[in-house]
Image: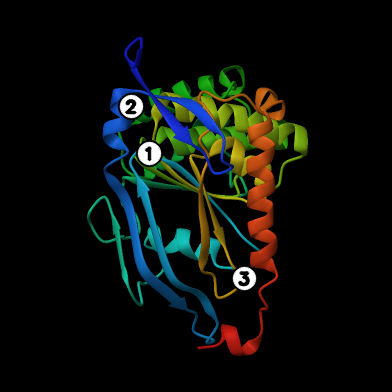
């Protein structure tokens, strides 16, 4: 059946509840195309620590996937392998059909800290990534201003980081990341250092940006509520060496509102299910025998 120009699918979600989910024709097509494919990937650090083991993970174009797991389970290692910052030791890994490598323009990486240069204004910081990529200054400025506007900082574009709150600084970092126009975004706990209220505000900002752009996102978080709120799927990893122990769909209708989700029983059921999976993953022992090559 049809609702306007969108197809409507009846999805059987992870908690056994049937929910109607609207999927536009463009999204239906692109979700079938793989963007990142990780198959049988393991990684051992030089000191012999086994970070991850036999990771299989596929992200489709335009999909938002979060990874949760205990500290030290290799979540960031997965991101660094996709970014080409670590060498591939085993298995196979492709990013848009090619091998990962550092510095490619179709991948952007956002860290937990804003990493703003104190001697540059908010606008100049938002332009920085495009400068590194040697994008023309006018194009870079236009992109940076557009995303500063979309994160609510247009009036503060001439302010230096010392004059910005922690949340505002992270908005600049978010604008800088989206201004790169990269189709794949790797985000390593970008809101992890924020207070609870600011984090919720930034989640809404990120959802608005993503809804407009539909880029492929691989998102690391320790916050299960954040994972459920933002994601199409939540991947649960075990204790080190990290293995994927579950891959749960989040079939809550989009666009989403943080406040509305708090009143949705399906949201709380999904949260509880992921929490139970994570509890089981954390319960797996981390000892020298299991983590040394």
Q: Is residue 282 left or right of residue 57?
A: right
How packed mark 1 is, by other alpha carbons closer than 10 Å (few <14, some 14-19, many 20 or more), is many
Residue 181: % across, % down: 36, 35
For label 2, the SS is: helix
Residue 190: % across, % down: 60, 45
Residue corresponding to mark 1:
130
Give the label on residue 239, or none: 3
- Compared to 256, does 127 lie above or below? below
Front-most of 22 and 151?
22
Let me know if residue 51 appears in the view. yes
Sequence order check, earlier mark of 1 and 3: 1
Q: Given this view, does label 2 or label 3 mark the residue nearer the observer? A: 3
Q: Residue placed at 34% from the left, 52% from the top?
A: 36
Residue corresponding to mark 2:
139
> Which image quadrant for residue 285?
bottom right
Q: Is residue 7 left or right of residue 174?
A: left
Q: Is residue 189 left or right of residue 137?
A: right
Quadrant of the snapshot with the N terminus: top left
Front-most of 238 and 16?
16
Sequence order check, earlier mark of 1 and 2: 1
Sequence order check, earlier mark of 2 and 3: 2
């Amino acid at each position: 059946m049809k609702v306007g120009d969108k197809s409507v699918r009846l999805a059987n979600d992870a908690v056994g509840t049937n929910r109607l989910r609207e999927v536009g024709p463009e999204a239906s097509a692109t979700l079938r195309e793989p963007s990142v494919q990780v198959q049988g990937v393991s990684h051992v650090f030089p000191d012999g620590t086994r970070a991850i083991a036999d990771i299989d993970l596929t992200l489709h174009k335009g999909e938002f996937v979060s990874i949760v797991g205990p500290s030290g389970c290799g979540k960031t290692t997965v991101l660094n392998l996709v970014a080409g910052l670590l060498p591939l030791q085993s298995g196979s890994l492709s990013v848009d059909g090619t091998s990962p490598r550092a510095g490619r323009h179709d991948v952007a990486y956002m860290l937990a800290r804003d990493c703003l240069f104190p001697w540059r204004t908010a606008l100049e910081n938002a332009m920085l990534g495009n400068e590194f990529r040697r994008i023309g200054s006018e194009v870079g400025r236009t992109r940076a201003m557009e995303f500063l506007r979309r994160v609510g900082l247009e009036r503060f574009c001439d302010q230096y980081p010392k004059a910005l709150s922690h949340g505002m600084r992270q908005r600049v970092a978010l604008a800088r990341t989206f201004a790169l126009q990269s189709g794949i975004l790797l985000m390593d706990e970008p809101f992890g250092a924020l207070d609870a209220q600011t984090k919720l505000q930034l989640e809404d900002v990120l959802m608005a940006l993503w809804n407009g752009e539909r880029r492929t996102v691989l998102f690391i978080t320790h916050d299960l509520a954040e994972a459920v709120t933002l994601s199409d799927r939540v991947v649960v990893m075990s204790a080190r060496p990290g293995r994927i122990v579950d891959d749960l769909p989040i079939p809550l209708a989009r666009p989403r509102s943080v406040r509305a989700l708090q009143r949705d029983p399906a949201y709380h059921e999904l949260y509880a299910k992921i929490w139970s999976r994570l509890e089981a993953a954390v319960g797996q022992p981390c000892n020298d025998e299991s983590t040394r090559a």
